[in-house]
């Protein structure tokens, strides 16, 4: 029995010496990977802002001003990339998923600013009708969706009221 115990203890000493250098190497590798993910997040946010602003000095000023949320956005993208990488178990695969999801809306917002001079808002996606994505309320007679209620835009329609309690019923032309 003494022989087995001495063999086990000597292998543990040898393994501990190996594991500390292996641990150090893994720590450096993990730090290098996290730093590279941070650089990808910075580049992604910079690219998105450059697309939306369409000006190099404005984008640099956005990152230089501490009162603007550039670095907070970088932190959000960094944490999202780390989370997606952890889910997939592969390094830097999140950039393949998150970059298009960030760059495409930035390009759409830039194009909207060219024509309408206002950026892309979340409400641009919320208020759509059933007629294949046209804006609600843009033409006379379309139903306008305001979340909980619907109303008719033109004056040629009146509401039918129930005779018992006066609650609104269906809409029909007069």
Image (spheres, rainbow, N blue to C red):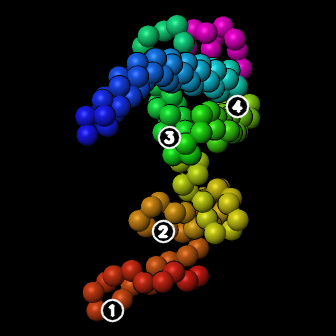
Q: Position of residue 139 (x, y in %)?
A: 67, 60
Does residue 147 appear to the left or right of 52 in the view shown?
left
Gap in Å between the C-alphas at discs 1 and 4?
52 Å
Using the rendered image of the protein, determine whether residue 102 is visible from the camera's viewpoint.
no
The x and y percentages for residue 156 are 59, 73
Q: Is residue 139 left or right of residue 126?
A: right
Between 122 and 156, the residue placed more toward the observer is 122
User: Where does label 1 land, which residue?
Assistant: 163
Magenta range is 54-62
Residue 148 higher or lower than 81, as above or below: below
Q: Is residue 30 above or below residue 58?
A: below
Q: Which residue is mark 3?
A: 86
- What residue lies at 62% left-to-right and 14% top-to-bottom? 59
Q: Which quadrant of the structure image shows residue 165?
A: bottom left
Residue 83 placement (x, y as % from top left): 48, 39
| Residue 150, label in figure | 2
Q: Earlier in the sequence, mark 1 or mark 4?
A: 4
């Amino acid at each position: 029995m003494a022989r087995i115990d001495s063999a086990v203890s000597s292998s543990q000493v040898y393994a501990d010496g190996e594991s500390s250098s292996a641990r150090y190497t893994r720590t450096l590798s993990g730090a290098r990977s996290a730093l590279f993910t941070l650089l990808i997040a910075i580049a992604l946010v910079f690219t998105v802002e450059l697309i939306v602003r369409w000006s190099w000095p404005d984008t640099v000023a956005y990152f230089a001003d501490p009162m603007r949320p550039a670095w907070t956005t970088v932190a959000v993208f960094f944490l999202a990339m780390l989370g997606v990488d952890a889910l997939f178990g592969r390094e830097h695969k999140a950039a393949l998923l998150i970059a298009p999801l960030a760059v495409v809306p930035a390009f759409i917002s830039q194009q909207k600013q060219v024509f309408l001079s206002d950026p892309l808002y979340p409400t641009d996606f919320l208020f759509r009708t059933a007629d294949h994505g046209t804006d609600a309320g843009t033409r006379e007679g379309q139903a306008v969706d305001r979340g909980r209620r619907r109303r008719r835009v033109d004056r040629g329609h009146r509401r039918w009221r129930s005779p018992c309690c006066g609650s609104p019923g269906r809409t029909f032309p007069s």
